[in-house]
Image: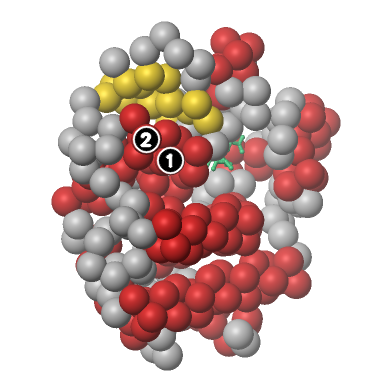
Amino acid sequence: MIKLYNFAQSTCSQKVRICLHEKNLAWRDELLISGEQKHLEDWYLKLNPNGVVPTLVDGLKKPIFESSAIMEYLEDKYPAISLRPQSSNARAQMRAWTSFVDHLTTPAVRYPSFQYGGLLRKFQDLTQEKFNQQIEMRPLKSDFYREIDKNRGFPQKVLRKALIDIRKSTIRMNSFLENYGGPWLMGKQFTLSDAAVGPLLDRIEDLGLEFIWVPDLPKIEAWLKEFQNRPSVMKAFYPGSRLSEMFPSLKIGKGSGQKLKSLFDL
Ligand SMILES: N[C@@H](CCC(=O)N[C@@H](CS)C(=O)NCC(=O)O)C(=O)O
């Protein structure tokens, strides 16, 4: 039996859930709640020493972590419904893109998610000392957490750089859509390229920051709509898995961030 340790709202978890649904696999949802911090407990660190979600456990073999490695594992182990293109060249292009997303887009999306999406909230009631302790508990993410002022979040300069990196990602996506002819990044087939980046753009739209690509990159807007309407994606984004639903009092959601547009002057 496949088990997936994940958070509802985690974009890295969402990309794996999409692949599991695309492949029609039976799997057990081992849902963790980020605020409970079970992902930092010893039993979990034995599964994933990085102390992050997602982690996939398939039978008695070693647990698998890193969302892109999990997607590739599912491709290798369960190839019947494939999310990889046929040619070796196209596969290499796809992997270069998923690596770009892991190194640039995923870290960039973290900043506005914490700033505008309610992810800072769980720390705001802590004393600075307790917050520092929580930072040090994180095997890999301490540096990112150290950048946070728990009451104010991040400086404008840091947020702007993140938004610029997200913009760079959408410009690169646009060239994929032009080169391969759409509707998906690698052409007619929905692949790991789409699954890797889709939850990140969905998050940005949910924060109301889609002005990053609207209105001058209409192909990105159309691609995102198509992505959100795909059955596997609708299953992966079950009710309550978007930040706007988890934190309704924030009143975020598509269109909500227009007022921030002039602040960032992208
Ligand atoms: N590179 C990792 C990143 C995983 C990651 O950062 N996961 C976040 C949720 S999207 C997490 O578990 N955060 C826990 C924390 O910050 O304590 C992957 O792709 O799996």
Q: Position of residue 79 (x, y in %)?
A: 27, 38
Examine the rendered structure and indicate whether residue 141 appears above or below residue 245: above
Q: Residue at x 38, y 26 (%)?
A: 4
- Judged from the image, the secondary structure of the residue bearing numbered disc 2 is helix
- Residue drawn at point x = 32 percent, y = 21 percent: 2
Using residue 26 as the reference point, say whether residue 105 is left or right of it: right
Toward which corner of the image does residue 59 lie, by quadrant?
Answer: top left
Residue 27 seen in render = yes
Is 58 placed above or below 251 here? above
Q: Is residue 219 shown left or right of residue 234?
A: right
Asked whether residue 109 appears in the rendered view, the answer is no
Q: Which residue is mark 1?
A: 72
Q: Which mark is residue 155?
A: none
**75 or 35, nearer to the observer:** 75
Mark 2 and mark 1 in contact (Cβ < 8 Å)? Answer: yes
Q: Residues within 10 Å of mark 1 (few under 14, many from 20)?
A: some
Nearer-the-camera pick, 174 or 12: 174
Q: From the top left corner, tell me how far across and down residue 144 is, in percent.
A: 73, 47
| Residue 243, x across and y down, in percent | 41, 50
x then y, percent, for residue 62: 51, 16
Q: The N terminus appears in which quarter of the rendering?
A: top left
| Amino acid type, mark 1 | Glu
Q: At 59% across and 38% down in the image, what residue appears?
A: 122
Q: Judging from the image, what secondary structure is the residue with disc 1 in?
A: helix
Which residue is disc 2 drawn over?
76
The answer for how far apart the CA atoms under marks 1 and 2 are is: 6 Å
Of the four image quadrants, the one with ligand 1 is top right
- From the image, state whether disc 1 or disc 2 is nearer to you: 2
Residue ranking furthest to the bottom: 216
Image quarter hosting the C terminus: bottom right
> In screen coordinates, is 46 left or right of 158?
left
